[in-house]
Amino acid sequence: MKLTQFSEEEQIFLKKLDTDKFEQILPALKQIEESGKPEYLPILFDLKLNSQIDLVQRELNALFIGLKVQAAADLIMSAVADPLYAEIKSFLISLAWQTSLDFSDYFDEFVRIFVSEPDFMVAFEAYTVIENMDHHYAKFDLPHLVAVLKEESLSIHADKKELIVELIHKFQDIIENGFPEE
């Protein structure tokens, strides 16, 4: 755990995360949550990846889902791209639809993950993010997206075929009929 970027006070409570004792980890997690500082996220990603304690995993899930600082989205997407976090990639992607953070700047990245990711669960989480960004679709070049998805549908793995067809139909319907009324 690299702590040199943090103050001495921060280092003291962050070191409490480096244990297998839930009683020590919980107060540190609460302190991190109260601070609202996204700079702690990489340490929490490491803890998510390495902790074998179910209670810690549950506390981390709740903490991640409750994120409110928009800068956290950039850190989450950096972790998604980092091979070090491949084991928790589907969880990290799920944060894009489980949190109130705006991940619309990463729409193209989620499309890329959906079509190219060999792990179905990771691809399915990216698909879910794309589906849940419907209130942002007006920002995107949907005709171009349909063309890309049609091209990818020719070689996409069979387990994602139905999903890509659904997206193509959904986006074509929006192009032809406009956005649905809210």
Image: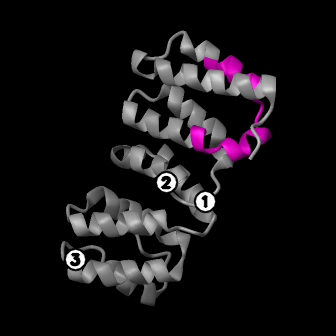
Q: Is residue 49 above or below residue 167?
A: below
Front-most of residues 177 and 4: 177
Left or right position of 19 against 39: left
x and y, in percent, of residue 18 in the image: 27, 73
Residue under circle 1? 101
Q: Quadrant of the N terminus?
A: bottom left
Q: Earlier in the sequence, mark 2 or mark 1?
A: 2
Res. 40 mark: none
Left or right position of 42 against 16: right
x and y, in percent, of residue 70 in the image: 63, 64
Boundaries of the magenta span: 130-149
Q: Earlier in the sequence, mark 3 or mark 2?
A: 3
Q: Is residue 139 above or below residue 118?
A: below
Does the segment drawn in magenta span residue 139?
A: yes
Q: CA distance from mark 2 to mark 1?
A: 8 Å
* Marks 2 & 1, CB-CB < 8 Å contact: yes
Element under label 3?
helix
Front-most of residues 87 and 151: 151
